Image: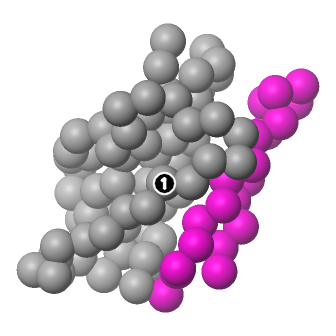
Amino acid sequence: MESKVYIGPHSSDQWGENLISETLENGETLGITFDNNATAKSWDIKIVWVDAGAPVVWMNCKLEDISKFVLHYNRDTEVTYAETE
């Protein structure tokens, strides 16, 4: 199984394409930029972990106010949380 990252406008039920081509290792970063023509104000973020657990989704994120979205996953408890800057 491979990990995946999706971002889509909150107003849409479509995720679009997976944003990564290979699994990110602990401590790695993924830079994401948006087309200047993007008009959505709120976005949903979906993470599919390489482990078999359920995907994690953050809804209604105002990405124009976020410069960094740091994910944390505890394999022992299968708990995921995010910190934003």
Label 1 Cα neighbours within 10 Å, binned few <14 / some 14-19 / many ≥20: few
Identify the residue at horizontal 30%, vertical 81% (top origin): 41
Name the residue tied to disc 1.
30
The percent coordinates of residue 82 (x first, y second) are: 69, 59
Query: Based on the displayed image, in which of its 4 quarters is residue 75 positioned?
Result: top right
Residue 84: say if magenta: yes
Identify the residue at horizontal 61%, vertical 15% (top origin): 52
Q: Amino acid at mark 1?
A: Leu
Q: Which coloring applies here?
A: one colour
Relative height, residue 8 to residue 85 (above, below): above
Left or right: 36 in relation to 75? left
For the residue pair 80 and 85, the one nearer the viewer reads as 85
Where does the magenta region start and end? 65-85
Left or right: 4 in relation to 40? right
Relative height, residue 28 to residue 40 (above, below): above
Query: Based on the displayed image, in which of its 4 quarters is residue 84 positioned?
Result: bottom right
The percent coordinates of residue 12 (x first, y second) are: 21, 57
Identify the residue at horizontal 23%, vertical 76% (top origin): 40
Relative height, residue 71 to residue 39 (above, below): above
Residue 72: say if magenta: yes
Residue 55 visible in the displayed image: no
Residue closest to the far right: 76
The percent coordinates of residue 49 (x first, y second) are: 58, 29
Query: Based on the displayed image, in which of its 4 quarters is residue 31 positioned?
Result: bottom left
Residue 62 visible in the displayed image: yes
Residue closest to the far left: 37
Left or right: 19 in relation to 63? left
For the residue pair 24 and 44, the one nearer the viewer reads as 24
